[in-house]
Image: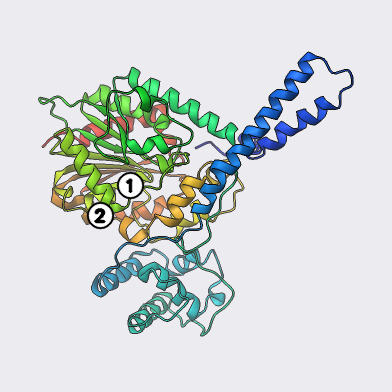
Amino acid sequence: MIGTSTVEWMLIRVSIFAFRYAPILYSIPIVLLTSVHGAKAWTFFSTWTFTVLLLAEAFFYVLAWKPAQRRLRLQAQHPAPPTRDERRALFQRCITTAPDPAAYVQGWFLGADLDDIRRDNVREFLLWAFFDHDGTSSADGDEDELEDYVAGIEQALGRKLEPGRSSVKSLRLTFDKIETAYRGLLWYAVVFMVDQATHALMMWYGFQYHAAESARQTFPPRPQNLWTSKRSPVRNLSYWYHPHQANNTQQPVVFFHGIGIGLLTYIGFLNGIRRRSNTGIVAIELLPISFRLTDPPPNRVEFVRQMVTILDHHRWDRVALVSHSYGSVLTTHVLGSPLLQSRVTSVVLTDPVTIMLHLPHVAYNFTRRRPRLANEWQLWYFASTDPGVAHCLGRHFFWRENIIWAEDLLHNDRKVAVSLAGRDIIVNTAAVGEYLEQEKNVQVVSFPGLDHAQVFDDRRGLQTLVDLVHATTAAY
């Protein structure tokens, strides 16, 4: 994540304009060059070049961008609903752990004044949050339970909600319209080059690439899938592998990355773990959150099944989970699975989005905040409105199965460490830190001056993080 200086703001705005409006930039030279009298050979060549670029952009728009946009209109396939007792327990926990009930409610209503949030508005929000219901019809069989939840909100607020409905809207992530911003071939050319550079660097550091079958249906294409000798044992998950030595006292590491351009951000971190601990590493690639046009991510059940297959393939019975940002979602799925939870001995989370996920900050900051500062513009264009990321968050991100609590992390006496950035523009790190302080067995490391993901760019912070992983993943 970049900073907030004026220079960075100017650079990010220029970059966004170039990637978003590339077809216009191609058209201007064509108009200027064709208006020149007495055109020479270089003029003809330049005009032809920009014309080809414009035609390529048109083909990309019709054949790749528009189909990706049509997919965004599909409805979310919500997971199986919890039981009434599970739902009631979750609601009570959400209300009692919210640091400020008024801010909690207002946050989910996009900052609306409490006086404008009426009883039916809250009912509509609760129907989405706890019932996966769009509110277009009555909640048959759940009316009494729903009324109990509304009463619980009123009790937490210390006031009665006005009857009826107002014009305010709540944030309902899996029902709301998905917002994207155009990015053309110029951007995907950058993604392609970064992908190839990442591949070369990972191989240089001794990692082995295991290609997945689904990666063949990805844009920009990944030619490395044609010549790699290693194949992933599962369809949806490609990954990088560093062998684990049987006599190593460290547990092998499974790493889940966050939303971004792939593993490039984490090369120094992964190589640091390799050099510090010489332990085995499996670094999963999740292409739907890596700025590609590709298949949607596997659901929780399928993801867990594929992870079991990968670990069995390498004969890893005990592992340490290390994740960043969105990778904490995958961590939650692993720790919640009877098939895998007993195999995890330790957990290291950096900038986790799943702790205190019932608070509105992660959903609002990532999908609704209007950007002002340079880092907010970076987040908005290059992540939030990327079609793959937006589709993943808007139709495949189910907060109830992604949220994690301290006892889930500490189950089976795991060693747990959490790294938080004090200036995080996505996560409410103050609330997360306060919640974790109540658990003496969770080690919390804070970087007060850093923003989300900046620890991987900060030399001292990166070394601290590598040392933290080394200490936490040591075998019992």
How many numbered marks appear? 2
How dense is the environment of label 1, judged by Cα within 10 Å: few (below 14), some, or many (20 and up)? many
Task: Identify residue type, mark 2.
Answer: Ala
Given this view, does label 1 or label 2 mark the residue nearer the observer? 1
Pointer 1 or 2: first along the chain: 1
Left or right: where does residue 230 sit relative to residue 447?
left
- Residue 476 or residue 157, whichever sits in front: 476
Residue 388 pos. (x, y %): 47, 45
Quarter holding residue 348: top left
Left or right: where does residue 474 sit relative to residue 326?
left
- Residue 188 or residue 110, whichever sits in front: 188
Quarter holding residue 317: top left
Secondary element type, mark 2: helix
Quarter holding residue 53: top right
Identify the residue position indicated by label 1 in the image.
328
Residue 410 pos. (x, y %): 19, 51
Left or right: where does residue 376 sit relative to residue 327?
right
Task: Identify residue type, mark 1.
Answer: Ser
Residue 197 pos. (x, y %): 44, 23
How far apart in space, not on screen, are marks 1 and 2 (Cα)? 13 Å
How dense is the environment of label 2, judged by Cα within 10 Å: few (below 14), some, or many (20 and up)? some
The residue at 14%/24% (across/down) is: 245
Q: Quadrant of the C terminus?
A: top left
Secondary element type, mark 1: helix
Q: Residue furthest top?
A: 41
Q: Can you say whether 328 is above or below 118 in the image?
A: above
- Residue 136 or residue 126, whichever sits in front: 136
Examine the rendering and report whether any part of residue 112 can be seen: yes
Identify the residue position indicated by label 2 in the image.
406
